[in-house]
Image (cartoon, rainbow, N blue to C red):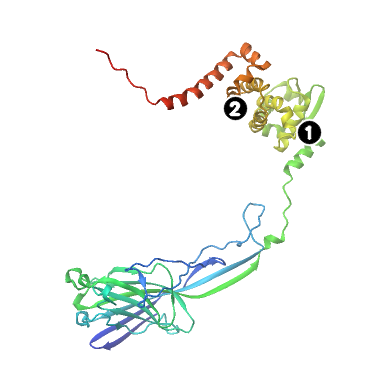
Amino acid sequence: MEATALESDSGNTNMAVIRVASPSSVMMNSGGVSSVSSQLSSSDCCTSGGGGGGGIGVGSGVGSGCGGGGSGNGHPFAENWCFTQVKVIKFSYMWTINNFSFCREEMGEVLKSSTFSAGSNDRLKWCLRINPKGLDEESKDYLSLYLLLVHCYKNEVRAKFKFSILNAKREETKAMESQRAYRFVQGKDWGFKKFIRRDFLLDEMNGLLPDDKLTIFCEVSVVSDTVNVTGQSAVSQFNVPDCRLADDLCELLDSQRFSDFCLLVHGQEFRVHKAILAARSAVFAAMFEHEMEERKLNRVVITDVDAEVMANMLRYIYTGQAPPNLESIADDLLAAADKYALERLKVMCEQALCAGLTVENACDTLILADLHSADQLKQQAILYINTNAAEVIESTGWNTLVNKYPQLLAEAFKALATQQTLPLLMMMGPCRKRSKQT
């Protein structure tokens, strides 16, 4: 829609061109409206009376609701939800003032445009107001520009606005806009007391007054309505059972159903499933892939793993869970986890052994960690030995470390020397060269 109105006032011609854009919708959640404060400087948006007003903040995104709760896929959902749609109407207005240099130059003098609205059916009436020589003593060297709500059928409306001057090429220049939506009531205006300096505006070199015409372009965005749509999530009507994968696989192991391979450990048979063992352990996968005797017989004899340790290792392979008695079998289970390339179980054992370090077992734990490449446990064991060296050297494990694993003893001493040297060097500071004596 486009409408043009001409009005003559004391030799000044006011041309109003209204362009109504299609209403745009801003989506927000039910808690998305907040008050936005703003510090107003002399060049910021303000009312001609110096008053303040509240702002409006619009949040985006609604989705499945605002509340807590969870779903099987990890995304939050709520049993009840609200979708709030804020409608914003945008329109523009152009005001041309002929013979601008002849406007009365007394401070505080007011010049108003004709009224305009977003369309013929819009009951909100607006106008622009300027003070050619400022509003007060502070702004006497500026042109002041305001948007005034002339008529309003509601208690208040909220709107954002943008002012600019069209130059000789009809291009927007010297644009200023509100940073938030301001609260307008009937007879209330908002704008800029120091919109543009008069000397800059009147300078012909700047091209802002072609043929002595001042053309002001104004864009307004008005919050027209809000609509709430509420509902209940269908997701809340379904109770998704907990995952039983670990329990089901544990039951499959215990029942031996559909088993296709046998592990014989010190006379005890463990009926297992090759597919599960191969999926969880690269060592078992290699055993089943190659033409080995075990593959042909679907049976293997294991002599270097205790039956209890094997039972707990298989339970981990099927369920991914550490055994409840991990602390008591952590050393043997660590060796088994290393043999069958079960890295996660191996680290679980390292953690349990580290938590159980004592003066008596520190050296044995260091030896165990070195044999099975448990690097994290090895570092912690060395640190423990160095921290408690006076007590550890009295333990039986110390003699074993000295006599059979001298390389580990050297590593421990190297770590101890590093720990003691670094603080000493930091205290001494940089070395100085000795001066030659003459």
Q: Earlier in the sequence, mark 2 or mark 1?
A: 1
- Point out residue 164 in the picture as x, y percentages from the top left corner: 31, 71
Q: Residues within 10 Å of mark 1 (few under 14, many from 20)?
A: some
Q: Is residue 379 left or right of residue 425?
A: right
Q: Is residue 198 left or right of residue 62?
A: left
Q: Residues within 10 Å of mark 2 (few under 14, many from 20)?
A: many
Task: Determine which residue is flagged by label 1.
Answer: 259
Measure how far apart labels 2 and 1 are at the Cα level.
Answer: 41 Å
Q: Is residue 66 left or right of residue 176?
A: right
- Point out residue 54 in the picture as x, y percentages from the top left corner: 45, 72
Residue reaching furthest to the top: 403
Q: Is residue 334 above or below residue 3?
A: above
Q: Amino acid at mark 1?
A: Ser
Task: Determine which residue is flagged by label 2.
Answer: 380
In the figure, residue 142 lies in which quadrant? Answer: bottom left
Judged by depth in the image, the label closer to the viewer, 2 or 1, is 2
Q: Residue at x 17, y 69 (%)?
A: 205
Q: Report if residue 81 is visible in the image.
A: yes
Q: Residue at x 20, y 71 (%)?
A: 199
